[in-house]
Image (cartoon, rainbow, N blue to C red):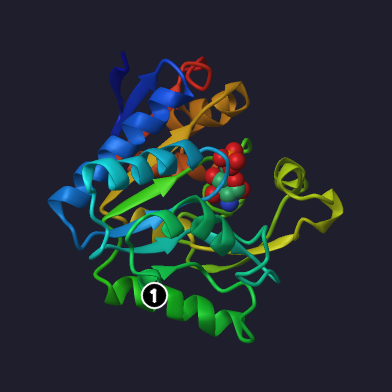
Amino acid sequence: MAEQKQMGKIKVIVCQDKQEVAREGANIFAQAVRENPAIVMGLATGGTPVGMYKKLIQMHKEEALDFSRASSFNLDEYLGLSGDHDQSYRYFMDENLFNHINIDKSKTRVPDGKAQDTQMSCRKYEEDIRAAGGIDMQLLGIGSNGHIAFNEPGSGGDSRTRVVDLTEGTVRDNARFFEDGSQVPRKAVTMGIGTILEAKKIVLLATGSNKADAVTKAIKGSVSSAVPASFLQHHPDCTFIIDREAATGL
Ligand code: GLP
């Protein structure tokens, strides 16, 4: 059974294993979709949310969880990759979630990695989020260095959607997804920390011992751009769902 604790403003749910993290995360999202079918979801990529997306697909198929009125904005995208590249985050979202539920694809948004004018396209992404009424529930993972989306250490708490350089460590962490590790892009488009903090509710998932240090610093460390996830301590409604391995430092 998952154990709950309140650490400052952050609610922490400590699960037995990553399967339970996936179940808890899916239950929170499913309930939000049922309560507000026209929900604006903020979605994330990476290995961590895959299990939760599988559960949501199962709930859609077996329990008629209905996404027909929902819309979504993804956190980030690699710069230079188009949506049909099999390592792009657009491709990831289609494969791992959108193709298997009844969401209207035209209402799913991922930053454009191939925009001609990146500044304008970043500004437009922010405008589109605002025009949609803001993000109701934002899903996050966490990088082993404490990054959220692609906001690497040094990112300001008021940063907005923009092009960023990835750190060597992040490039290394993400190389496992690429057939040829040297192909990992070194730049990305990411929502800013300020953008993320405007979501009405935030749910962060983390599993495995390689995330323990980042999770500890995010929840118990001082709030600073050295650990971008620490800015979540300021958010009024943020829940961390983590497994026991990621919780060892709490
Ligand atoms: C990438 C993504 C992040 C994600 C992180 C962790 O850097 N941009 O949004 O949280 O990876 O990924 P994983 O879940 O694979 O550990």
212 relative to 20 in the view: left or right: right
Q: Quadrant of the C terminus?
A: top left
Can the viewer see residue 175 in this picture? Answer: yes
26 relative to 50 in the view: left or right: left
Q: Residue at x 27, y 36 (%)?
A: 27
Q: Residue at x 38, y 20 (%)?
A: 14
Can the viewer see residue 235 in this picture? Answer: no
Q: Residue at x 57, y 29 (%)?
A: 211
Three-letter code for the amino acid on which mark 1 is drawn:
Ser
Report the front residue among 46 and 34.
34
Residue 225 spot, x, y in % from top left: 55, 47
63 relative to 108 in the view: left or right: left
Label 1 sits on residue:
106
Q: How many numbered circles are shown? A: 1
Q: Secondary structure at mark 1?
A: helix
Q: Residue furthest left?
A: 35
